[in-house]
Every structure is written in structure tokens, then in C-alpha cells.
Image (tube, rainbow, N blue to C red):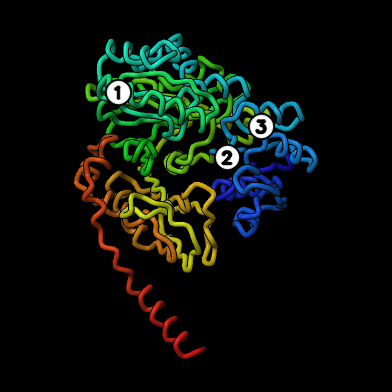
Amino acid sequence: MGKILIANRGEIAVRVVRACAEMGIKSVAVYSDADKNALHVKKADEAYSLRGDPLGVYLNPNKLANLALSLGCDAVHPGYGFMSEDPAFADRCARRGVKFIGPGPSIIERMGDKTAARQAMIEAGIPVVPGSDGNVASQAEAVKIADEIGYPVMLKATNGGGGRGIRRCDSAAEVEANYERVVSEATKAFGAPGVFIEKCIVKPRHIEVQIIGDQHGNICHLYERDCSIQRRNQKLVEIAPSPQLTDQERDQVCEHAVNAAQAVGYVNAGTVEFLLDEKRNFYFMEMNTRLQVEHPVTEAVTGIDLVQEQIRVASGLPLSFSQEEIQWRGSAIELRINAEDPKLDFVPSFGRITRFYAPGGPGVRLDSAIYSGYVIPPYYDSLCAKLTVWALDWQKARKRGLRALQDTIISGIKTTAPYYTEILSHERLIAAEFDTSFVESHPELLEYDETAPREDLALALAAAVVANAGL
């Protein structure tokens, strides 16, 4: 490949630009009016404006595919979010002779349909959570199935993702109250009203396995990540490998993931997600047919550049490694630093970044698209940086994460960075004993001190003195 259009924005677009640069491939950025000063625009070899609605311009498959073709691009990298799991976009690219860096449209469509994915796993012998055989047709049917499998249950949008379109129900009354809400959420967010029902696994561990396959039939796993620290089904902290699994459990879940990928003929990078219950049983949850936000922790422990490997696979080349050659070393943690105020129920905190200082030192990586003076627009996801730390073991990685958080300065907006200091200092994290109920079970984590660092106070005082002096 000689030229790739990046159909995304923010830190993931910058991430792909860097991979292209190392491979000697030209990168093309696209941007909305709100993103004209964005870092991915400045970093790419070429950049083209997309006129129109700030959000909608990134969601127009025809326009993006046509632009890639007209600019002579060999491929499109969709990143994550937006249209990364849109089979129509993958199809548009294929029809124009432009490679879509990801699986084919049929696989995206099949795995994006949660009931179809569930059925595929049943046929492949992968354990799944007890639930409905396909979509439920009515509120009454949902109640009937819930009564049969036992409460609590989860109502889920069939085409859902990113933690949206999911409601827990602890009784028939709650199923009745939430059914229409989930249908409405599914229709608005994903364009389809389909809803299915599953048994709710109480206080599970959320374990996902990174897989990648090529066009020559090779499929490998790159071990697992622990995504149990989450809020309202949105991941906050990711750890690789999971400090909560035994070697036998790790082998078991990774084998499940490879079998799942082989069963559907998977090509390119993807993630197979599982729930681990209190009896140490794994259940298939879903397959994400794209690069994950948390891929840096896998890169940190394996040394494999997943984006470059995606590009190799899309080019028709075989994987550059075999399963036997993949080894993990040490422990890595990724913290999603969002432009949000945790003390105000995580309300978004958009605006100008008055000062930005990135952490550094051994084993520290920061993926971001922010800089001093950058204005975070209100139209997009609140993620502004991903802090990834690596060390030889779990406790050293945790301590390195605390140090890196102390080094990080993002002024002018509120962020979740101080909240992560509380999480990494908690006794359950230290003991590596946590599940998906962790955040909700510990509201005291929000009682952190918001006192500004002395350096920031000194700068603010100096600015005030200069302003008062009329300088």
C-alpha cells in the first residue's frame, strides 16, 4: 500500500498516522470544521475538509469511500467508533476497489448482530450465557423468557455496542418498564429495534481476548485483557494480562477466542469478549470486529504493533508471526483519561486546554490528540488521552501508573485523571480482586482532593499579576 485514508479523528487517527509513517505509507486525514485545528490534521501527510454537520461528516460512507478513490488511496482505516463496524461502509469501499482495513462486510454484519453471533458461537461449541433464541418479539415474551431463566436478566440491543442499549432487570416489573426503553435506545442509536434477553451474570469479571487473522487462514490470539473496571458498561481501566486469571484459565479463554474466530472465518484484528462468573466459568459475550480503544496494553506486553499488522493483513500478506512466537512479558495498564468531571456525575468538560504536560519515563506511553491551546469540541466522545504504563509485574505497573498520573498536567478542563489515582490506590486493586461492580460499589473514590498542583497555582498567580499590571 502507498496511501491510506483515515476515516476517523482524535487520538486513534494520530495512532494510524504514526503506523503509516513507520511503514513508508502516506496518510490522509479528513476533518470537520470543528476539527480544523486537530492534531491528526497537522500530523498527516495530506488533510481534506469535510463540510457539513460536525458529527455527520464522519458518518457518510459514500462520501468517504468516494474521497478515498478520488485521492488515489489504496485503503481506508476506520479506526474505532464511527463506521468501523458498519458493513455498508466496508461494502462501499470494496465496490470502489479500495481496501477496508478490517474484516469483510458479511463478517461485520454477522458479528454485529448479537443474536446471530450468539448462534454462531453455540454452533462452534463456545459457551454462551443462557437467554433467548434470537430477538424477543414483545414485552410479554421478554417477561416469559425472563421468568424461565431466572432473575436478574439483561435486556440488550441486538445491534448494540459501546455499553449502550443495555438494561439490567431484577423482576418482571422491571422488564416491563425497560423493554420499550431499550427498543427506543436501539432504534435511535443503531437504527434497528431488535432486542434479546440474557441471564445476568452477577459481579462477573470482564475478560476479552485480542485476535487477528490473515487471508491465508492463520488466526492467532495475543492473550487477554481485563476490562472489569467500568462504569455503566463503559470501560475505564484495561489490564493485560489479567492479574485475576490462572495460567490454565488464560489458556482456556484464549482457546475459546481462537475457536470463535475460526468458526466465522475471521480476517484482520478483532476482540472476543467473555464474562467470567463467580464459579470461574467463561461465557461468550460478543465479538468486536475492529481495533479496540485498549489495544495499546496488548502491544505493551507482546511488542506487536497491531495497526501495522492490520495493514499487512489488508495488503494480502500473511501474519508476521506464528502463535508460538507470541509471548507476553510483564504487565500493562491503560487508563482512559476523559474530559469529564467525576464529581459531577462525569458530565463532559469541553473547552480550551490551557496547559498540557505529558508524562514520560520508562514504560510510559500516552496516546492523545490534545495540546496546549487546543479546544476540545462538544460534538464527540470525551476521550482526550490514553495513558498506558508497563512494568515487569502487576504491582510495579500499578505504581508506575500512579507516578505517571502525578506527572500528567491537563489544565483548563476537568478530567478523570485524579479519579484513577484513587482507583489504583484501592486495596481491591492492589490485591487484584475486582469485578464489574467495583465502581458502583465504591462511591467514596469520588472524594478525592481537587487542590491544584503548586506549579499550576504559581502559573495562575503569575498570570493574574501580569493581567493586573496591564502587561
| Residue 291 in the image, given as x and y percentages of width and height | 53, 36
Q: CA distance from mark 3 to mark 1?
A: 36 Å
First in residue order: circle 3 vs circle 2: 2
Q: Secondary structure at mark 1?
A: loop
Whole-percent x and y of residue 187?
51, 28
Q: Which residue is mark 3?
A: 100
Query: For this view, does 440 lie left or right of residue 380?
Result: left
Q: CA distance from mark 3 to mark 2?
A: 11 Å
* Tag nearer the camera, 3 or 1: 1
Foreground residue, 379 or 261?
379
Q: Quick check: 249 above or below 330?
A: above
Per the image, label 2 sits on a secondary structure element best described as loop
Q: Residue at x 46, y 17 (%)?
A: 115
Callout 3 crowding tier (Cα within 10 Å): few <14, some 14–19, many ≥20: many
First-in-chain label (3 vs 1):
3
Q: What kind of element bears circle 3?
A: strand
Type of amino acid under label 3: Phe
- The residue carrying pointer 2 sits among few (fewer than 14), some (14 to 19) or many (20 or more) residues within 10 Å by Cα, namely many
Q: Position of residue 159 (x, y in %)?
A: 50, 25
Q: Is residue 26 visible?
A: yes
Q: Residue at x 55, y 28 (%)?
A: 191
Residue positioned 71% across, 27% down in the render: 94
Three-letter residue code for mark 2 = Gly
What amino acid is at disc 1?
Answer: Cys
Say whether marks 2 and 1 touch (CB < 8 Å): no
Can you give x and y, in whole percent of width and height, for residue 234 in the image? 39, 39
Q: Which residue is mark 2?
A: 79
Q: Which residue is mark 1?
A: 200
